[in-house]
Amino acid sequence: MAKNIVGNQDGLNGRNKTYNIQGRGSNIPRITLVKEVKQGKHPNHMLYKRNGKVYLRAKPNANINDNVNKD
């Protein structure tokens, strides 16, 4: 279970193709984390669909450090 998942913004127009989880490593493919979120392994995150692709998003709260893209 990851508290913070950070998008690498390494895809077209800054989309996240891979993500980083501290202690687990970087360049974790989006599809891997999508499957894990669907399985309930990351309860602080949810999925959203944009232009036919599914991405991760941190569940809303007041802490900006929890966001996938912190910019």
Image: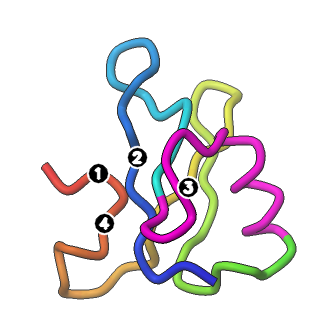
Whichever of labels 4 and 2 marks the residue nearer the N terminus, that label is 2
Amino acid type for the residue under numbered disc 4: Asn
Per the image, the residue denoted by label 4 is 67
Nearer the N terminus, badge 3 or badge 2? 2
At mark 1, the secondary structure is loop
User: Which amino acid, by three-letter code, is at mark 1?
Assistant: Asn
Residue at (33% x, 24% y) in the render: 14
Q: In terms of sequence position, does the residue under pointer 3 or pointer 4 come before the other?
A: 3
Separation of disc 3 and disc 1 at Cα? 10 Å
Q: Is residue 28 left or right of residue 21?
A: right
Residue matched to label 3: 56
Judged left or right of residue 69, residue 6 is right
Callout 3: few (<14), some (14-19), or many (20+) C-alpha neighbours within 10 Å? many
The amino acid pointed to by label 2 is Gly
Q: Nearer the viewer, residue 52 or 40?
A: 40
Residue range (magenta): 21-38
Q: Label 4: state its secondary structure.
A: loop
Whether pointer 4 and pointer 1 mark residues with C-beta atoms closer than 8 Å, the reply is yes
The residue where tag 1 is placed is 69
